[in-house]
Amino acid sequence: EAGVAQSPRYKIIEKRQSVAFWCNPISGHATLYWYQQILGQGPKLLIQFQNNGVVDDSQLPKDRFSAERLKGVDSTLKIQPAKLEDSAVYLCASSLDMVFSGNTIYFGEGSWLTVV
Amino acid sequence: AQKITQTQPGMFVQEKEAVTLDCTYDTSDQSYGLFWYKQPSSGEMIFLIYQGSYDEQNATEGRYSLNFQKARKSANLVISASQLGDSAMYFCAMREGPAGQAGTALIFGKGTTLSVSS
């Protein structure tokens, strides 16, 4: 079974530029999450989708971040314009649905963003 | 207030020794789940162990065990017989809400860096 795919793995951009990250969850997984992990900290939820609907985006900085999951499968997270403090790893995760326990939420390898 | 607190920024242990990584949590829900993940320098999040709030027995998975003290709201990870490959960041996380209904996303602590030396 293929895991959660993310691209690009690494990106360096200048501040005020834009960047987009792509995530393809595990086939059949209805729930998709984007987390932001700043160096030395734990992941923080940015947005959670159930199919193509947003369940929780309360911590998404909507003035610069946007995310979509138009067909309920893959998702794109965009940052525009980027700030220095956006330097982080962006982790995508998926689960079969919102009910999970144990080893039933799967993480991608992350997209590492450096803003200079 | 933080939902998940990991008070140990770094821990150092020698090979073959046991180590305990602390985690306390805060929730008013009666039903919740507690998770531990390992994150090596490569960045992937590796699931280690899970404890449901109604599970009566402490969870164990190989060398990992979870010391669950519900009244104290603590869920410490115990790694027995440490190995060099255990060196990594360790995160405690919580899912609030009952397992049988729609829950919330995982909430993570700030993590503990474990260094295992020979």
Image: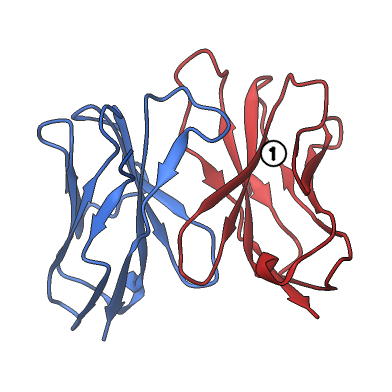
Chain colours: A blue, B red
The residue located at (83%, 71%) in the rendering is: B15
Which three-letter amino acid code belongs to the residue tagged 1?
Asp
The residue located at (82%, 20%) in the rendering is: B56
Task: Name the image quarter holding the C terminus of chain B.
Answer: bottom right
Q: Which residue is mark 1?
A: B26
| Foreground pick, B14 / A83 | B14
Furthest toward the bottom, the residue is: A116
* Dot 1: chain letter: B
Within 10 angstroms of label 1, few (less than 14), some, or many (20 or more) residues?
A: some
| Foreground pick, A26 / A62 | A26
Which secondary structure lies at badge 1?
loop
> Going by the image, does B70 lie left or right of B85?
right
Quarter of the image where one finds residue B62:
top right
The residue located at (12%, 76%) in the rendering is: A17
> Going by the image, does A111 lie left or right of B83?
left
Q: Is residue A80 above or below residue A102?
A: below
The residue located at (45%, 53%) in the rendering is: A44
Give the x, y percent position of residue A115: 27, 80
Give the x, y percent position of residue A4: 31, 46
| Foreground pick, A66 / A33 | A33
